[in-house]
């Protein structure tokens, strides 16, 4: 049974930024536990044959001074580029959004392919994280960055009533390889004048991350909710009809794949960058749904996840210095 000062559950953007904040403040006895084979969460990129497709976040905007400072560093490092947009530039990763997550997580202590089954709050002792394989990790503080419904299932003994009203809309994303160019206009992003139920269409070749023409079609939350229990093949066939609208004459789709995001976007936000739970408030829940009070955008996004992770890391660092 191992022990850590801070255990971070979830290696998405919030978890990465919480860990980086703690490390910057000299707190190094930490671990990120991530159930997937890669960090990044919705900074997700899939290889499709010889090409690539972002199938989570496509870009991000900047409103806060903290993110603006980091964006300048990331631009200088060659990690990101300005893709499109005015007055708010849309930034994207030059090698796919997951590459940005990996760059940010470099040198952080991470356990991949590791799933948490529960978190227990001992009366007088340390917090206990139990893994699916039966292993246990003890910690002074825990930061949970999983989507709220998932986070609450990990906390059966910890009251979290203030979060139980948070629900998420799903999102289906179809990813298609075209034999030739698409008619998606440059720079490869379209979110207006789309068929009903379609949120956006992205050509990753024109975006600059794919050597082949790969097109992602994002469906709205309402559309995805109504079809959530249908078979993947049925859903993908419907989305492919949208993708076919962007074929040039003589072109064809040579590969099609589907991504299900069960927790794509919160239907209500929390006006606090984190929530502290447990007997001594040693369990913190954060993520993109947790907004700073003066957040002008008022919705979940890359920046809200980034800021929430930083705020959670700062709060835990402050608590550790008090003890």
Image (spheres, rainbow, N blue to C red):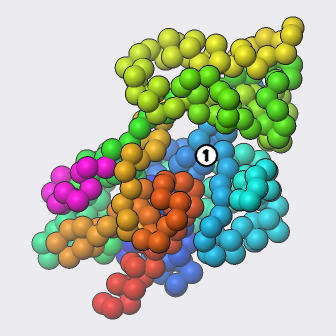
Q: Secondary structure at mark 1?
A: loop
- Residues drawn in magenta: 156-166
Is 157 included in the stretch rendered in magenta? Answer: yes
Q: Nearer the viewer, residue 192 or 317?
A: 192
Q: Residue at x 32, y 67 (%)?
A: 275
Camera-nearest residue between 30 and 81: 81
Residue 204 in the image: above or below residue 72:
above
Say if 195 sits above or below 110 in the image: above
Please state the horizontal and vertical placement of residue 240, each as a whole percent of the image. 63, 16
Q: Locate residue 159, reporting x and y percent.
A: 17, 60
Name the residue carrying label 1. Answer: 57
Q: Reply above or below: 58 against 237.
A: below
Task: State left or right for residue 201 relative to residue 31.
Answer: right
- Magenta stretch secondary structure, dominant: loop
Quadrant, the N terminus? bottom left
Residue at the image position 79 percent from the left and 65 percent from the top: 75
Which residue ends up furthest to the bottom in the rendered image?
322
Residue shown at the point (30%, 90%) measured from the top left: 323
Q: Nearer the viewer, residue 253 or 303?
A: 303
């Amino acid at each position: 049974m191992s022990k850590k000062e801070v255990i971070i559950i979830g290696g998405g953007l919030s978890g990465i930024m919480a860990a980086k904040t703690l490390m910057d403040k000299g707190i190094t006895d930490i671990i990120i536990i991530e159930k997937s084979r890669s960090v990044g969460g919705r900074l997700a990129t899939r290889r499709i044959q010889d090409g690539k497709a972002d199938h989570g976040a496509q870009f991000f905007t900047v409103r806060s001074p903290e993110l603006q400072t980091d964006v300048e560093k990331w631009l200088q490092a060659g990690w990101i580029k300005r893709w499109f947009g005015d007055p708010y530039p849309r930034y994207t990763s030059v090698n796919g959004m997951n590459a940005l997550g990996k760059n940010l997580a470099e040198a952080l202590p991470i356990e991949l392919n590791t799933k948490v089954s529960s978190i227990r709050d001992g009366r007088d002792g340390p917090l206990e994280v139990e893994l699916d394989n039966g292993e246990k990790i003890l910690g002074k503080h825990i930061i949970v960055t999983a989507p709220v419904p998932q986070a609450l299932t990990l906390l059966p003994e910890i009251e979290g009533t203030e979060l139980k009203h948070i629900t998420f809309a799903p999102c289906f994303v179809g990813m298609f390889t075209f034999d030739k160019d698409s008619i998606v206009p440059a720079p490869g992003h379209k979110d207006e004048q789309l068929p009903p139920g379609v949120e956006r269409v992205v050509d990753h070749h024109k975006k600059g991350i794919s050597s082949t023409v790969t097109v992602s079609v994002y469906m709205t939350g309402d559309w995805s909710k109504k079809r959530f229990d249908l078979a993947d093949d049925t859903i993908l066939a419907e989305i492919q009809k949208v993708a076919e609208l962007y074929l040039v004459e003589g072109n064809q789709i040579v590969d099609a794949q589907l991504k299900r995001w069960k927790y794509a976007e919160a239907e209500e936000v929390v006006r606090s960058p984190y929530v502290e739970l447990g007997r001594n408030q040693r369990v913190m829940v954060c993520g993109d749904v947790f907004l700073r009070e003066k957040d002008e955008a008022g919705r979940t996004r890359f920046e809200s996840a980034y800021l929430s992770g930083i705020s959670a890391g700062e709060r835990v660092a402050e608590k550790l210095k008090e003890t």
